[in-house]
Image (tube, rainbow, N blue to C red):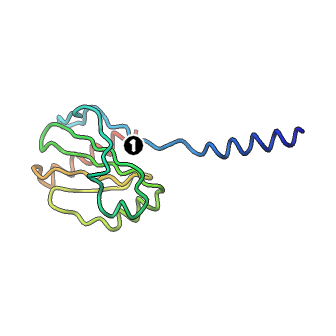
Amino acid sequence: MVAMRAFILLVALVGCGRPRAEIHFPSDIAGGWRLEGAPVESLAEAWPDARTHGLESLAVAKYSGDGDPVILAHRMASSAGAFETMQRFRAEAGTTAFQYGIFFIVVRSPAMGQAGLSRFTGEFKQRISR
C-alpha cells in the first residue's frame, strides 16, 4: 500500500515536467529604448529555420527609440534546436541573432546601423541575464 502511494506520487511528479522557460522583456533598455506595450505571440513572423528545429512559440516585442528595434524570441523545444537554428542563421542587413538557453532570438532594425544594433542587442542581453 505504501509502495503504491509512493509510486503514484513519483509518476505525478515526473508528469509535471520542468517549468516553462520565459523571456522577460525589460520595460526600458539603456540608450533610451522603451518597450511598446506587451509582447505578442505571433508565429507568422517566425524565422524559417526555427520551424524545422522545434519551434514552440514566438514572442514579438517592439521597442521605441533609435531605430525602433523589434525582438523575435523563438522558444524552441530544446537548447539543441535553438543552437541548430542559430548555426543556420544568415544575417541580413538590419538583423542580428543569438541563442539564450532554449531561445533563438533575432533582433531586427533596418533603420539602425550595425553598431547601434550591436549596442542594443548587448544591452538587451545584459538585462535578460540578470
Query: Residue shown at 27%/52% (left/top)?
Result: 44
Q: Nearer the viewer, residue 12 or 33?
A: 12
Residue furthest to the front in view is 44
Q: Nearer the viewer, residue 94 or 60?
A: 60
Q: Closer to the camera, 57 or 116?
A: 57
Q: Residue 85's x, y, as percent?
A: 36, 63
Where residue 6 sits: x, y (%)? 81, 41
Q: Position of residue 89 (x, y in %)?
A: 29, 64
Q: Which residue is mark 1?
A: 129
Residue drawn 75% across the image and 40% down it: 9
Residue 129 picture quarter: top left
Q: Position of residue 7 (x, y in %)?
A: 79, 44
Q: Amino acid at mark 1?
A: Ser
On screen, residue 5 above or below 107: above
Furthest residue in direction right, as rendered: 1
SS category of the residue bearing label 1: loop
In the image, what residue occupies the spot 12% across and 44% down? Answer: 67
